[in-house]
Image: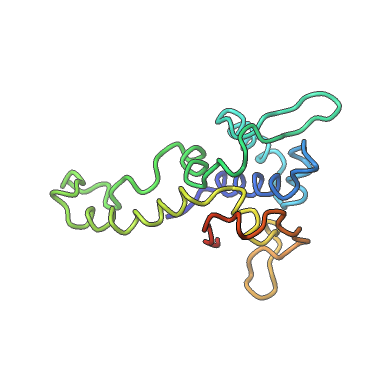
Amino acid sequence: MKISQASAYALHALMYMARHVTQLPVTSKVMAKAEGMPAGYLAKVLQQLVKAGFVRSVRGRERGYIFAKPPAEISLLDLFQTMDGEPLFDDCPLRHCTCGGTRQNCHIYAQWVSATRGMKELLDEMTIATAAWQHPEHRFGVPNAKSGVGGPLNVLPNPESSAKNNGENATF
């Protein structure tokens, strides 16, 4: 499974908002600069998030974006499916085969459904609120010396105690 660039930017924008909830509304330019994302592309991604009802645009002097839906109610599965416009894992990996891709007539598709069920459940249970505190804050395009992936910035402590975690302990 490969998440689109738009989905990755949407996830990081929402995690930024969750980490900085006391500083909302926040503009797309502030988020883009903080996360190392292209401002124009992020603005388009945020428009999709507004259309989907995840965030709301605030106009006026205190302009920017705020959550329209609590981050604890936005699952990663909902976010990715909204951004990519299709259900994850529902298609057969052999899309161009003539078998018709049903569990009854294709052993490969049956195995695919079984293998992806757990990932789908994990993404449905993981929320933006939980992901924000379990994923290192970093900038796109700024490599970490050890992994080559985005490097850590100042990560704020999680205001929610681990008791409120609801067992959502997956990391990305």
Q: Where is residue 54 in the image (x, y as percent from the top left)?
A: 59, 34
149 to 129, vertically: above or below: below
Q: Position of residue 36 (x, y in %)?
A: 72, 52
Name the image quarter holding the C terminus.
bottom right
Left or right: where 29 falls relative to 93: right
Count all numbered tags in the image, as a single digit. Answer: 0
Q: Where is residue 2 in the image (x, y as percent from the top left)?
A: 46, 54
Question: What is the residue that sits farthest to the top in this orientation?
Answer: 60
Q: Residue at x 37, y 57 (%)?
A: 118
Please state which of residues 37 and 12 is positioned toward the viewer in this rendering: 12
Question: What is the residue that sits farthest to the left in this orientation?
Answer: 105
Q: Which residue is drawn at 77% across and 48% down?
A: 33
Please state which of residues 87 and 135 is positioned toward the viewer in this rendering: 135
153 to 59, vertically: above or below: below
Left or right: where 141 falls relative to 27: left
Q: Which residue is drawn at 64% across and 44% down?
A: 14
- Residue 10, by quadrant, is top right
Name the image quarter holding the N terminus.
bottom left
Question: What is the residue that sits farthest to the right in this orientation?
Answer: 61
72 to 155, vertically: above or below: above
- Residue 144, by quadrant, is bottom right
Left or right: where 27 falls relative to 80: right
Question: What is the residue that sits farthest to the front in this orientation?
Answer: 163
Q: Residue at x 66, y 76 (%)?
A: 146
Q: Where is residue 41 in the image (x, y as percent from the top left)?
A: 65, 40
Colour treatment of the image: rainbow
Please state which of residues 31 and 130 is positioned toward the viewer in this rendering: 130
